[in-house]
Amino acid sequence: MATKTKKQPDTSLPMPEEQLQHVLYLLKLTRYFDERMEALYRQGRLPGAIYSGRGQEGTHVGVVMPLRPDDSLFPTHRDLTAQIAKGLDLKRVMAQFWGRIDGYTRGRDGNSHIGDWQGNRTFTVMSHLPIAYPVACGAALAYQRAGDDRVALAICGDGATSNGRWHEALNTSAVYRLPVVWVVNNNQFAYSTPNRLEFPVPTVAERGAAYGMPGVRVDGGDVLAVYEAARAAVDRARAGEGPSLIESVSLRWRGHAGHDPANYMPDELLERYMAEHDPVKNFETWMREHGLVDDDSLAELQARIEREFDEGYEFALASPFPEPGDAFKGNWTDDGYWASEPGRGGGTEY
Amino acid sequence: MTTIQMPQLGETIIEGTILKWLKQEGDQVARDEPLFEISTDKVDTEVPSPVAGTVKKILVEEGATVPVGTVVMEVDDGSGASDAAAGDGAAEPSAAAETETSDGSDAEATPAPDATPAAEPTAPAAATTAEAPAAASSTVTAMPDRGPRSGIVSPLVRRLAAEHGLDLATVAGSGSGGRITKKDVEAAIAAGGAPAEAPAAPAATVTPLRTPAPAVGTAPGQGDTVEPMSHIRKAIAEHMVGSIQTTARAWTMVEVNVDHLVRLRTSAKEAFRERHGVNLTYLPFVIRATVDALKAHPRVNARIDGDTIVSPGSVHMGIAVSYDAGLIVPVIRDADVMNTVGLARAIADLAGRARAHQLRPDEVQGATFTITNPGPYGSVASVPIINMPNAGILSLDAIVKRPVVIDDAIAIRSMVNISMSWDHRILDGEIATRFLARVRDDLERWDFAEDLGL
Amino acid sequence: MASTTVEAGAAGHGAEPRGKRTDDGQATYLIAIAEALWEEMERDERVYLLGEDIGAYGGAFKVTEGFLDRFGPERVMDTPIVEETIVGMAAGSAMEGLRPVAEFQYADFMSSGYDEITTVLSRYHYRSGVPMPVVLRGPSGGGVRASSFHSTNPEPWVAHAGGIKVVCPAFPGDAKGLLKSAVRDDNPVLYLEHKWIYRRIKEHVSEDPDLLVPIGEARVRRQGDDVSIITYGAMVHRALEAAAALEERGTSVEVVDLRTVYPYDEDAVLRSIEKTSHALVLSESYRYAGIGAEVAATIAEKAFEHLDAPVERLSPPNLPVPFSPPLEDAFLPQVADIEAAVDRLSAW
């Protein structure tokens, strides 16, 4: 029953209250979104694939919080939560899932293979891992050249750290001292491959040393801890001190994709993480403890979230399909397809 | 041994072109069976064999033009000793080969062709697309030897031939294995090569691949269809221009009340068809009337010959027939002795065979007067071009119901305009007009019913 | 053209300086390329270069000799051996407003950056509408005894991706004008410099810094009536040599230089075939699924009724480029092979 009187800014808080409320909103929204979408998927009402980020919201929201609108984010298919945190519109995200013209890629891609460079500076996800890492170097290079303090932040999973590109990108970023933050969302499984079969060292963070950059490991179940680590790395980059590596540890609660029952996931591990490292539950508890939320405000928040989801769902289904002829447009810049509003002629039903 | 000579199909014909050999050396041939196809100025036609036997030797190659009387083939009819003709046969380009006929029986100088020229297109069998060179390394990959390529017609050659109405059977091939190449076709076209027997209708056009650079003046522009003029089209053009430039053309028209003819025809046409096997049109009536008028005014049936005017004793009526290749004028010989039934039959026969490209050369010459009938297509008055050397050409236009004045009252009657273009060098206005008036009066007054043979 | 000397320049080691224009304004292909880069960098400060050994060393072939002093290390970036990241960085910086020209020391090494090229660079705009004005450039092609990792013709690999234009100039003037067009194009462009041409061909090249050669436009290098040779790159010069010899023997050959390989100037090709009715497609990229295969198929499809003979292709086989002179000469189409092919077509 906290009253809505204006308080003095509580300097013990890690960030202004407004932002904390926003963090809670994002955590709960994306959790709810994940649960509802999975349900729709299982009901056969969600076309295509779904790559759940459940249990990793602490990582996703935590690393994005320090970013400004003109900083860039380079995510993978797992990191939809981070993109929503960066500012993507839930309605258009859902239109993308249903392949509609109002989706961010106008139907060129689906589900979390999404991005909004023009609006929110997020790189449209590509499946190869971690193909966006070298591109993040490029954006950071541009910021460095421009002499401003913008930052590029790239996220990949534990599995992607095995790929040559990961090493190449980190190495190159350090050689040029690029303003980039390398985040590894270590949810402990790369599809079915656990960490111990993915890399020979105990942590990803210690690999930072090989590339001349600091590497920290944080508990992904604690969004504020993630936030702290990310903010420090972002500040470093803004100050021209070069790249950093953050390993945020969580667990992938669901299978790799909607179809994957994840029988390889040990039950005790999952149970423990759901009980002890649930970033949403943990942060809600923290907010309560700090008197920032109560049952009423939470109920209000939940209602808002459900409403937003329903509105997004409705928007998605009402958005037309792209026109079949669109398939042949928009390859070269010359044809003006992307410069104009999306055509609303509609295609055929799924 | 019987020698076959190039026939003379028409008085003025002095040479002919072998379009296609229908029999090869060694083939059996029955008497009257077609041996080869020839082309003359007037018509393309088949020449049948005067004897039964085996083809011994072909002395003139396809596409060659030789004077009338040239021995073109020898047929062994078992009638005597072998000839001593030189030459290799089909490929030999020599025109007039030496002939010796053992029994002195020549091929008829003018065989009476029992012709029913085939109307099939003579382009050789389907062009095959050549195989790609055998997949191999970069450098000296020899194309597989295709053996005799003479039968291969490339897409280009096929198209050019079609566009120009060129019968590839008349073109010599200088390419590999005797293949007809682009150069060969281009040369043949430039030489005014022999038309195909049945020009593909209409001449195929290839859409130009690129928009041609716009030329100044008369070059075809975008959207224009370009087709080369066929042999026959060129002949028609020449004849028409010649007529306009030579004759002093004048024109006169009369209106004819054919109400009763319309009623007669309407009531009788089915029975006529059943009885005589041909349709009854108005043309036989008009020809009957015209013939009578020609007899009454023989000058209209005449022609100029140098400084003289020749008036033939008979009327040979040319009837203009429109067909796929353009215009042709078969002639009803001695139309003056034919009645309506006979004329109807003759018209049906000639028009039908004209459209099937089956007319004989002598059937398209010798008209003393000509009639054209654009009426069925809808014109109410036409100014035709005189079919030289005739003195006049009559046009029968459409029969339409019109209001006319009869006994100072207005009535509706079936009326037709009959007009004549006439040559003022031979005729004058009075005779031309009287002639037409007679045609009109005959049509209006005669009772044709008894002439229908029903 | 068969030569048994191994050229030092081919391997890029100890190559002599780039050189200058002659007094009467002639420039080699190499100089023309350097001029284009220099002028574009002067014109637009967003243009920058990245690649291995391009800065201090001036580039393996000396294309960028002198650039570091003039434009500084930020705009002439020496990179580690990171082909994927070179391309990725080019892509990312282009997304943030720069106009990178990324050099591959040899076009052969583009395969190390395959993913970033075909997945990111080729596809990104289609999926998002964000332009990536990136130029990838590098020396390609053989005939210099440099063997299989220094003689590749990668045009088909990249053309096949679909979203990257591929340019292969054969003459210095075209090289300059096309590189400028590539830099100014908002789409990704692969610009292949055939190393055989670098110092061998020179001609008068314009000094007009805004003289552009349009991408996607072919040029008839020699008019003829009997047979068309459709080709690009170093093979243009062999074709011209063959055409001269054939002329003396009475065959008139038309040589069409595609200049841009993807998308190529179909109109120009078909116009030529319309004229001559005989087509020889000559490409240094491999025979199977190479550039020649596409052009030949299109001719057969769209110029069918203009052909008086089958469409012939002359290309090397899908094998590594060999080193030993007799092997490489057998591998690559030679002038004699071109003449023989034209003779075959004329006699068909």
Image: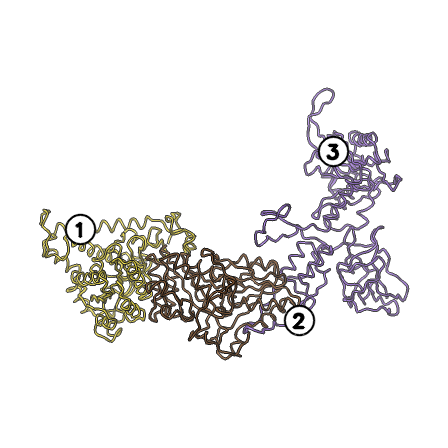
Chain colours: A yellow, B purple, C brown
Q: Position of residue A266 (x, y in %)?
A: 21, 70
Task: Tell me the amino acid under the disc marked 3.
Answer: Leu
Give the residue pinned by disc 2: B147
- In this rendering, the answer to whether C67 lies above or below B417 is below
Residue B77 visible: yes
- The CA distance from mark 3 to mark 1 is 100 Å
Image point (38%, 47%), residue name: A344
The N terminus of chain C sits in image quarter: bottom right
Q: Secondary structure at mark 1?
A: helix
Q: Position of residue B115 (x, y in %)?
A: 78, 54
Chain letter for mark 3, please: B
Q: Secondary structure at mark 2?
A: loop
Give the residue pinned by disc 3: B264
> How many residues crowd around disc 2 within 10 Å: few (fewer than 14), some, or many (20 or more)?
few
Of the pair A289 and B334, the residue shown nearer to us: A289
Residue A55 visible: no
Say whether disc 2 or disc 3 marks the residue closer to the N-terminus: 2
Asked if marks 2 and 3 fall on the same chain, the answer is: yes
Of the pair C224 and B415, the residue shown nearer to us: C224
Q: How many marks?
A: 3
- The CA distance from mark 2 to mark 3 is 69 Å
Residues under numbered marks 2 and 3 in contact, where contact means CB atoms less than 8 Å apart: no
Outermost residue toward the front in this view: C23
Chain letter for mark 2, please: B
Task: Give the side of residue C282 with respect to residue C193, left or right.
Answer: right
Outermost residue toward the top in this view: B408
Q: Position of residue C84 (x, y in %)?
A: 35, 68
The C terminus of chain C sits in image quarter: bottom right
Residue C318's tag is none
Task: Tell me the amino acid under the disc marked 2.
Answer: Gly
Residue A301's tag is 1
Task: Give the side of residue A68 with respect to residue C39, left or right.
Answer: left
